[in-house]
Image: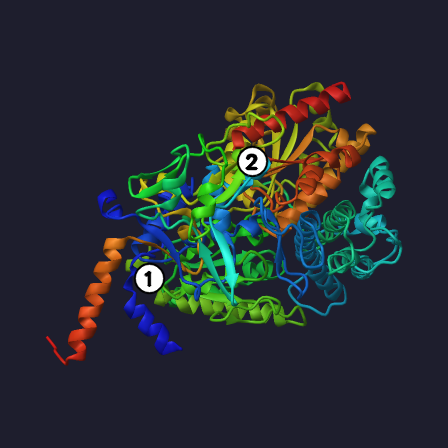
Amino acid sequence: MREQIFSGNPFILADPQKCRHCHSCRLACAAAGAKMDLASALVQKVPLAARNSLVTVDEVTMLMQCRHCEDAPCSRVCPLGAIRQAEGRVELNKEICIGCKTCMMVCPFGAIELVHRQATAAGGGSQYGERQALVADKCDLCYDRLIQGKQPACIQACPTHSLVMVIPERWRQAHLEQSARDLFRGLGIQK
Amino acid sequence: MDRDNNLKEQKHPLWNACIQKEIERKPVAERSSDPASQLLLEKASREGIETAWDRYEAQNPQCGFGELGLCCRNCLMGPCRIDPLENGPKKGVCGATSDIIVARNLLRMIAAGAAAHSDHGRDVAEVLYLTSQGKIAGYAIKDEKKLKALATEFGLEVQGKSPEEIARQLAEAILDEFGTRKGYLQFLSRVPQKRRNLWESVGITPRGIDREIVEIMHRTHMGVDNDYVNLMLQGLRASLSDGWGGSMAATELSDVLFGSPQIKTCQSNLGVLKADEVNIILHGHEPLLSEIVSQVATEPELLALAKEVGAKGINCLGMCCTGNEILMRRGLPVAGNFLQQELAIITGAVEAMVVDVQCIMPSLTTVAGCYHTKIISTSAKAKFPAALHIDFHEKGDQALQAARQIVRLAVLNYPNRQQQKVCIPENRMEFMAGFSKEAIAEALGGSLGPLIEVIKSGTIRGIVAIVGCNNPKVKQDFAHTTLAKELIGKDILVVETGCAAIACAKAGLMRPEAAAQAGPGLSALCRQLGIPPVLHMGSCVDISRIMSLAAEAANALGVDISDLPLAGAAPEYMSEKAISIGAYVVASGIFVLLGVVPPILGSQNVTHLLSQGVEKVIGARFAVEPDPIAGAKLISEHIEAKRKALGI
């Protein structure tokens, strides 16, 4: 299963035509990041931040998040090596992030955002006392859930099924099969 | 457009391939703690029939904004929602904050709950009115003693008047309570003076049953009340108009019409269905129809018809609060509680399920479509597409005629039962019920004095009411029965109503033998009186019996209700009615433990007010604890603190 999934970095893709802008994906993402349900996070006053963004442009709303690039610019520029290619994903280590924002600037998708350190899964306080440090954060593909055989939280939360996890090899294979079918049907070949 | 979509679907099969919605299915042992439910859930899954549990799992994860109470649809500038995450809008278009939105949403739930109970009360009052004028057949005044006591309470002259005349005046007086202009409800005379003064000073004395509900709808309209504290106070006031108004009227007048419950032994759980008889389940809330149906089911002509179609008899059973109403007064068996309504049909042995109002799942007709069961709706207020509607007019002999027609239909449906689909669980449990305030006093030798004495002496530490529904978020009956067992083990007497009561009846906690599971003090008391440690006090509106009991105890001791070692708990609640109940129990001064998180966490201020702040004002608060064992500990600590403060 894991091998199949990680044949190339998968990523989450949204279908704007199905999206009803309910923001469930964002709440689910924040809860997954906090590793607890929303209600508990609010009671325990754990700051919540989603790693995905609902963007509306030209009257179309689309969910945007990290594409887990194979040659990720963020990973190349990080001065601390906090971002690296991990198994099937681009991993960001918030523990050592210094919040220099370089990754944020070079990301072609705007997928990296700044969150309070407490709001990250890593938790922990700030060494600056009251002032909470900002660190970079982004979609981690819900790796913890994937290895348990579960879908990423945003996909599971979407009531209109507008999100899919694109697994590049499978996606391409499906395209090939469909195109072949279209072609031989177009040529009038029937089996 | 359609063509484009089709093309796209074809072009990108992965849109479909990758989105098999992953539904986490709980095993049946996790869904319910009742073996009868478990058996039928297995049957449902074998036969491919969807139940509330399946639908709940398909809904997961549920909407986060709804869960937190942060979505507002009260005007058309919206819908708006407050983003609980760090970087999102914190105000609606009008400027409403999370405090305002959460408070308004909660208030509207209270209004709906209070409306449901109170409208039930109004229906009973109207039937009493028609009965008093002889305009309706099948009903009579069964409890003249209570009729006279109530009339006196309402300041009516009873000397030299016929019961019918008293009933007419009482029904009129109670119907007037819905729109009264006198500034308070008559039943408030039962409330200790201290508490009435407190309500007056805080401004939450209910002024009329309908009025407080209407005022909630007004205040929560766009741009009216924007102070969450002021809003919550109105919520408490409206809930009091339910607890000390609509619900109390429903209970008291049902007692007048159908008799005050007396202690009796009944049977519970789906094992009460009979393999060789016509099974009719009466489901819903009001006793008006079920009383008549169960009466006519004993008529010789209908019994003869049953014999003709090959059945040995007609078996009338209750479910949910209709079940509680008829078991309290007639001792009819109760087939199950809220989450068993679909399962009852899945037994394949139910000829008709007759429903009136409230807590009736719209799915029933779909489930019934897989069996021979007829769903018969009877209230003009509650129709179900695909159900058979037999309008139950409370006029002339129409009620009787409708009831006969319903029973006849059920009997004629018996030959359609498909034997290969029938599966009746063996689980049935005997239990004691009928513990109205009057019956408890009678068991104690005529007054509540001995009960107060054993609380004072510490033989029993206090009294806790466990009430409320089932909710697929909680393993069915588990929280009800675990909490009850924990509490009786700590020598705390448990009184119950509603689906909580049915849960404990099914679990055997309402048999005198259950005294063995109680602590030494409570156990000895139960053995001495021959009663169980968990008492069945009736349906959801009968929580008013518990309120009257609490008020009487407080008056006897010359203290406020909030001084008494009492608590309320709703471990598996789901309905808006339960929210109204929780609010009036807290407003009456009793600590309330909830097992399901109410939709208020989106506002820290409202959450803080209800879980802490409100105690300083009215002497009671809410607590949320999904774990029944931890909940029992919280309740026990609360009761011991109250005892200490009372010096007992």
> Which structural element holds mark 2?
loop
Mark 2 on the same chain as mark 1: no
B266 and B355: which one is in front? B355
The disc placed on residue B88 is none
Residue B342 visible to the viewer: yes
Outermost residue toward the left? A191
B34 and A56: which one is in front? A56
Q: Position of residue B253 (x, y in %)?
A: 72, 54
Residue B423 visible to the viewer: no
> Which structural element holds mark 1?
helix
Q: Is residue B267 above or below residue B180?
A: above
Count of picture labels: 2
- Image side of residue A9 versus residue B392, left or right: left
Q: Position of residue B152 (x, y in %)?
A: 85, 49
Q: Residue at x 69, y 57 (%)?
A: B115
Quadrant hosting residue B590: top right
Q: Is residue B555 above or below residue B67?
A: above
Q: Which residue is mark 1?
A: B15
Which quadrant of the figure contains the N terminus of chain B?
bottom left
Q: Is residue B235 above or below residue B486?
A: below
Q: Chain of mark 1?
A: B
B272 and B59: which one is in front? B59
How many residues crowd around disc 1 within 10 Å: few (fewer than 14), some, or many (20 or more)? Answer: many
Q: Position of residue B266 (x, y in %)?
A: 52, 44
Q: Which residue is mark 2?
A: A46
Q: Residue at x 57, y 29 (%)?
A: B632
How many residues crowd around disc 2 within 10 Å: few (fewer than 14), some, or many (20 or more)? Answer: some
Q: Amino acid at mark 2?
A: Val
Q: Chain of mark 2?
A: A
Q: Is residue A102 above or below residue B393?
A: above
